[in-house]
């Protein structure tokens, strides 16, 4: 059975290990984080500290954009965008990784403490009863401090999250 994680699209480009899990995983990706890929891809601002790493990550972002724009995938995504909280049919990446796009709606429930994308990640994790995966330690700290009812893991603990018995 596949384990489900809530994640930003860019993390798939930045953290290659997410595409090679030891067990099947499904990543639920809020649609706004896919839109963010276009900005990151064309931005002159570096994503990574090292120039070579930045070039590689931007190349991976470009590949993700192409994947999401493929006719068949685009139709699946558009289907999800027809209703609030709609989910796309599965978009398989490889034998262990499947993506699903969620048309998450930021209802400003956590707007004082979290930005709109963080709020969408939180609400999606709550709604789907799934684990939130992030590389932003300060985001995890704010989740804990605010007593947000989600389970969150740092990307560095990804394999533990995949292997573990953790349930939301």
Image (tube, rainbow, N blue to C red):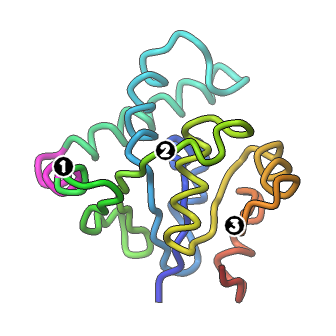
Tell me what residue is drawn at x 18 percent, y 47 percent: 74
Report the front residue among 128 and 13: 128
- Image: magenta residue range: 70-78
Q: Is residue 150 above or below residue 66?
A: below
Read off the residue under disc 3: 150
Label 2: which residue?
A: 106
Secondary-structure class at tag 3: loop
x then y, percent, for residue 109: 60, 48
Separation (CA) of disc 2 from disc 1: 19 Å
Q: Which mark is residue 78?
A: 1
**Secondary structure under the numbered disc 1 in the rendered image:** helix
What crowding class fits label 3: few (fewer than 14 Cα within 10 Å), some (14-19), or many (20 or more)?
Answer: many
Task: Name the mark nearer the viewer: 3 or 1.
Answer: 3
Q: Position of residue 57 (x, y in %)?
A: 53, 33
Which of the 4 image quarters holds residue 39? top left
Magenta stretch prevailing secondary structure: helix
Q: Which mark is residue 7?
A: none
Quick one: label 3 or label 1, which is nearer the N terminus? 1
**Residue 91: image location, x then y, percent:** 29, 63
Q: Earlier in the sequence, mark 2 or mark 3?
A: 2
């Amino acid at each position: 059975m596949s384990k489900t994680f809530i994640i930003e699209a860019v993390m798939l480009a930045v953290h290659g290990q997410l595409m090679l899990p030891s067990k099947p995983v499904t990543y639920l990706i809020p649609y706004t984080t896919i839109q963010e890929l276009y900005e990151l891809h064309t931005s002159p601002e570096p994503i990574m500290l090292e120039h070579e790493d930045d070039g590689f990550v931007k190349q991976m972002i470009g590949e993700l954009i192409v994947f999401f724009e493929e006719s068949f995938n685009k139709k699946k995504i558009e289907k999800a965008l027809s209703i609030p909280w709609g989910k796309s049919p599965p978009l398989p990446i490889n034998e262990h990784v499947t993506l699903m796009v969620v048309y998450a709606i930021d209802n400003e429930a956590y707007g004082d403490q979290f930005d709109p994308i963080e709020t969408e990640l939180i609400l999606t994790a709550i709604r789907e009863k799934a684990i939130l995966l992030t590389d932003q330690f300060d985001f995890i700290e704010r989740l804990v401090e605010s007593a947000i009812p989600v389970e969150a893991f740092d990307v560095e603990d990804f394999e533990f999250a995949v292997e573990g018995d953790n349930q939301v």
